[in-house]
Image: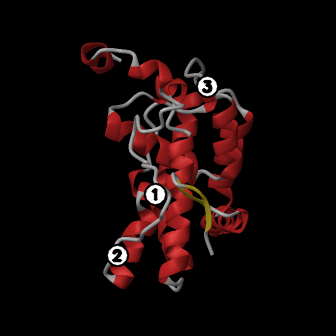
Amino acid sequence: MTVPIDAAGTLPTPAEEARFWALIESAWAEVGPQPLALRRALIEGDPDGSGDDNAELYAIEAWLDPLLDRLRRLSVELSAQELADLDRVVERKLHDIDREDIHEVTDGSDDGFLYCRGFIVVLGREYYESVRADPARALIDAECEALCYFFAHLHNELFGTWPETGSGISRESCSNPVGWSDWAGRDVEERDQA
């Protein structure tokens, strides 16, 4: 079930968001204790790039493929509507952190910034919320491209169509006008140099 919010589109329901975050946590739990410890270090630490310990935090990237394999296994039996609902959640989460202040920390081109936001989301709700509140907690250039359209690709694979999220938003970089209010005032040359 989806809840229309206005002419702009549909928001994920609290139940859809809870299901999404639960799937992410279940997939991480199956990967083992080492990545859980790395995730905890990202949440509790201060990854500002200044310390030698920061390099160790990037070790979490080695666990992304096994994590996504488990997430796929946990999701493959879901209905077309359930996958569309999960895709709407991912789309919303990516859109909400499509912000200039987060981009300044993570860096990257338009696509690179999308993949950096995928990394933030795939690490789970706690890390996602910590970066939303304090962008300095993000890692520069840490990416998870596969999550950005994970449920859309699975929907297409299983049902032969791309899901309709009904959200009226985009997950692509620089599409959240609230997150890029200062960006819009820059000319093209300034944006290319940023």
Query: Which secondary structure, mark 2?
Result: helix
Q: Residue at x 53, y 32 (%)?
A: 139
Which quadrant holds residue 46? top right
Q: Earlier in the sequence, mark 1 or mark 3?
A: 3
Q: Nearer the viewer, residue 33 or 188?
A: 188
The residue under label 2 is 156
| Nearer to the camera, 22 or 141 | 22
* Residue 161 appears in the figure: yes
State the SS at label 3.
helix
Instruction: Report the label total.
Output: 3
Residue displayed at 69% across by 42% down: 129
Quadrant housing the N terminus: bottom right
**193 sits left or right of 178 in the view:** left
Q: Nearer the viewer, mark 2 or mark 3?
A: 2
x and y percentages locating residue 43 in the rendered image: 70, 39
Identity, as a three-letter code, of the amino acid under mark 3: Ala
Q: Is residue 140 above or below residue 147?
A: above
Gap in Å between the C-alphas at discs 2 and 3? 36 Å
Label 1 SS? helix
Circle 1 crowding by C-alpha within 10 Å: few under 14, some 14–19, many from 20: many
Instruction: Compute the Cα span from label 1 to label 2.
Output: 15 Å
Q: Quadrant of the C terminus?
A: top left
Q: Which residue is mark 1?
A: 147
The reply to whether discs 1 and 3 touch (Cβ–Cβ < 8 Å) is no
Residue at left offset 55%, top offset 39%: 97
Q: Is residue 135 above or below residue 69?
A: above
Cα separation, mark 1 vs mark 3, equals 22 Å
Q: Which mark is residue 136?
A: 3
Q: Position of residue 19 (x, y in %)?
A: 67, 69
Of the numbered discs 2 and 3, the one sitting upstream in the chain is 3
